[in-house]
Image (spheres, rainbow, N blue to C red):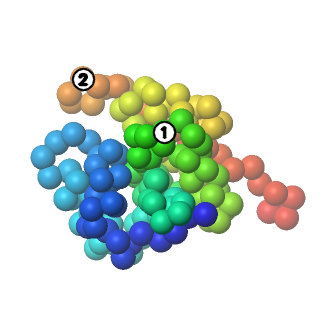
């Protein structure tokens, strides 16, 4: 089950996980932490088991009913165990968005999203010459919504 981490932004355990999800440039971790602290539309949730924070997902709920995943990370020793998949499935169940969206420059991350049923589109190269990907998961409408 996902827990709210907004009150824990800036702690060592949250900073460690968030550091795995931010781009590798000076002040990126500080900027990400500050954004989660300042903006009510940004949510930061974590997956905790037996008192240990194993992963986190940061996202923004948009006005059109979508969730824009900004950061997702799992402790290195717990990767490949389904925690990131579990966090995404929890978001789908708890928030019931129209779409889940994510952008990444990591081909492994793009493959992860593709394996979950996301459509993955190339956005071309960023100014540093790295290919960017847009990952989109369209939630199927239920009969009540049609």
Mark 2 is surrounded, within 10 Å at the Cα level, by few (under 14), some (14 to 19) or many (20 or more) other residues, namely few
Residue 102 position in % (x across, y down): 47, 45
Q: Along the line of sight, which residue is nearer the eye, 119 or 29?
A: 29
Observer able to see residue 6: yes
Q: Along the line of sight, which residue is nearer the eye, 8 or 141?
A: 8
Please identify the residue farthest to the front as the structure is shown: 50
Q: Along the line of sight, which residue is nearer the eye, 87 or 127?
A: 87
Q: For the point 63% across and 37% down, which residue is it?
A: 116
Is residue 85 placed above or below 63 in the rendered structure?
Answer: above
Along the horizontal axis of the image, is 10 left or right of 63? left
Q: For the point 35% across and 71% down, which residue is it?
A: 8
Q: For the point 38% across and 30% down, which residue is it?
A: 106
Count of numbered circles on the image: 2
Quadrant the N terminus occupies? bottom right
- Mark closest to the chain's N terminus, 1 or 2: 1
Task: Label 2, secondary structure: give it.
Answer: loop
Please identify the residue farthest to the right as the structure is shown: 143
Observer able to see residue 65: no
Residue 3 position in % (x across, y down): 52, 69
Mark 1 is surrounded, within 10 Å at the Cα level, by few (under 14), some (14 to 19) or many (20 or more) other residues, namely few
Q: Gap between marks 1 and 2, in whole Å?
A: 28 Å
**Residue holding disc 2:** 129
Residue 93 position in % (x across, y down): 68, 60
**Residue holding disc 1:** 79
Identify the image quadrant of residue 114: top right
Q: Are marks 1 and 2 in contact (CB under 8 Å)?
A: no
Q: For the point 46% across and 53% down, which residue is it?
A: 55
Task: Label 1, secondary structure: give it.
Answer: loop
Identify the image quadrant of residue 9: bottom left
């Amino acid at each position: 089950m996902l827990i709210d981490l907004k009150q824990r932004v800036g702690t060592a355990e949250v900073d460690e996980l968030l550091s795995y999800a931010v781009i590798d440039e000076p002040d990126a971790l500080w900027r990400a932490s500050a954004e989660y602290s300042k903006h009510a539309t940004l949510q930061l949730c974590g997956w905790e088991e037996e008192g240990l924070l194993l992963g986190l997902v940061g996202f923004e709920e948009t006005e059109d009913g979508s969730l824009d995943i900004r950061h997702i990370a799992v402790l290195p020793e717990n990767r490949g165990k389904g925690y990131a998949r579990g966090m995404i499935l929890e978001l789908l169940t708890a928030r019931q968005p129209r779409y889940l969206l994510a952008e990444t420059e990591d081909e492994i991350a793009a493959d992860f999203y593709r394996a979950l049923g996301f459509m993955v589109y190339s956005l071309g190269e960023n100014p540093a010459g790295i290919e960017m990907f847009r990952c989109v998961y369209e939630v199927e409408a239920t009969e009540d919504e049609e």
